[in-house]
Amino acid sequence: QEDLVESGGGSVQAGGSLKLSCAVSKSFVRPYCLGWFRQAPGKEREGVAAIYTGDGSTYYADSVKGRFTISQDNAKNTLYLQMNSLKPEDTAIYYCAETVAWVPSYRLLSTDSYNYWGQGTQVTVSS
């Protein structure tokens, strides 16, 4: 059983910044990939950013490229998502997710590639 706990959500005006954190519980099996996803009301959950924990390679959805940065702190078992230049359309519940199996890069932003999920943190961007 993996535990992922997100924090750092909140309300911000358009153009502002937030930094999300995800604490990943230590387990016997090291996660292969970690990702951030989001779900807006009435919409499907979508991939935002992902990282291979081994070499640190990162991948982003086109909608957030240049604005969001995913990173990890292995010593703290924590995943981060720095969000800059936020837009109202970024409003959603943000989830972190983990997989302990290798995932090809073209599937890193697919929800069905991940085994474990956090409970989510709300991000609201007002215009």
Image (cartoon, rainbow, N blue to C red):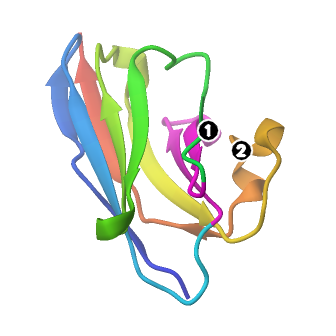
Whether residue 79 is in magenta: the answer is no
Whether residue 46 is in magenta: the answer is yes
Q: Residues within 10 Å of mark 1 (few under 14, many from 20)?
A: many
Residue 56 lies, in percent from the top left, at 54, 46
Highlighted range, magenta: 32-54
In the picture, the disc for residue 108 is 2
Which residue: 48% across, 55% down? 96
Residue 23 lies, in percent from the top left, at 34, 67
Which residue: 79% across, 54% down? 103
Compare residues 110 and 33 and report the one nearer the observer: 33
Which residue: 56% across, 90% down? 28
Callout 2: SS: loop
Mark 1–mark 2 contact, CB under 8 Å? yes
Residue 34 lies, in percent from the top left, at 56, 55
Q: Amino acid at mark 2?
A: Leu
In the picture, the disc for residue 47 is 1
